[in-house]
């Protein structure tokens, strides 16, 4: 996967391989995410990761990580959920996310259907705020709740069972 990513110019607005399709398997994606998570400047300790690529552009992620999750839920300042998340600092937290990717013509959006932390389903407003906060930390900052330009000249992302197809 890393070789596939390096084969495309990082800040290119047009595809380096127009008309081609790159296929990434679940195993390649997991290896890439684990490598990135365990690299320098890491803020979380990711100990386990499972990614299921389903049909109709739907994906599931299950992860175990050691991270203060409460900082991502600003709208839940005085809630029971925030208190539980704050107490879970230093423990291995389990995260379950189910979402869908929608993309076309070089633009895309990630729609989160379900987010559970330590088995607790997060309210929709809290999920939206956490996604916005994560997006602001990216370089360059993005708003994942809106359509955004896809990187690396990708024109369309298609998720099918076991793999992602990137149309360039």
Image (tube, rainbow, N blue to C red):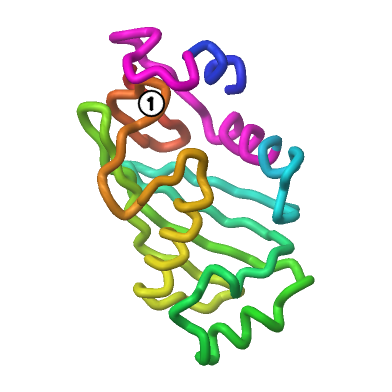
Q: Nearer the viewer, residue 133 or 120?
A: 133
The correct choice, above or below, for 4 with respect to 31 in the image is above
Q: Is residue 32 magenta?
A: yes
Query: In the picture, which quadrant includes the C terminus?
Result: top left
- Whether residue 88 is visible to the viewer of this picture, yes or no, is yes
136 relative position to 90: left or right: left
Q: So how many labels did they put on this image?
A: 1
Question: Residue 163, percent across and down?
Answer: 45, 31
Per the rendered image, the range of residues in magenta is 9-34
Residue on which the image places disc 1: 165
Q: Nearer the viewer, residue 10 or 120?
A: 10
Q: Nearer the viewer, residue 11 or 67?
A: 11
Question: Residue 123, percent across and down?
Answer: 40, 77
- Whether residue 56 is visible to the viewer of this picture, yes or no, is no
42 relative position to 106: left or right: right
Q: Quadrant of residue 54?
A: top left
Indicate the secondary structure of the residue bearing disc 1: strand
Q: Quadrant of residue 114?
A: bottom left
Q: State the residue at coordinates (39%, 9%).
A: 16
The correct choice, above or below, for 60 with respect to 29 in the image is below
Q: Is residue 127 magenta?
A: no
Q: State the residue at coordinates (58%, 22%).
A: 1
Count residues near mark 1 (Cα–Cα under 10 Å), then give few for <14, some for 14-19, many for 20+: some
Q: State the residue at coordinates (70%, 78%).
A: 88
Question: Residue 126, percent across and down?
Answer: 42, 74
Q: State the residue at coordinates (34%, 20%).
A: 13
């Amino acid at each position: 996967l890393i070789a596939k990513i390096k084969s495309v110019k990082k800040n290119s607005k047009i595809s380096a391989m127009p008309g081609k399709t790159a296929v990434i398997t679940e195993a390649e994606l997991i290896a890439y995410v684990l490598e990135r998570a365990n690299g320098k400047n890491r803020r979380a300790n990711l100990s386990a990761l499972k990614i299921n690529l389903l049909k109709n552009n739907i994906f599931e992620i299950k992860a175990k990580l050691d991270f203060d999750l409460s900082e991502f839920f600003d709208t839940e300042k005085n809630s029971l959920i925030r208190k539980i998340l704050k107490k879970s600092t230093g423990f291995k937290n389990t995260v379950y996310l189910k979402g869908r990717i929608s993309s076309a013509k070089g633009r895309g959006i990630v729609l989160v259907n379900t987010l559970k932390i330590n088995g607790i389903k997060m309210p929709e407003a809290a999920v939206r705020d956490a996604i916005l906060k994560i997006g602001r930390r990216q370089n360059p900052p993005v708003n994942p709740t809106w359509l955004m330009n896809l990187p690396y000249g990708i024109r369309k992302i298609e998720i099918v069972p076991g793999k992602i197809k990137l149309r360039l």
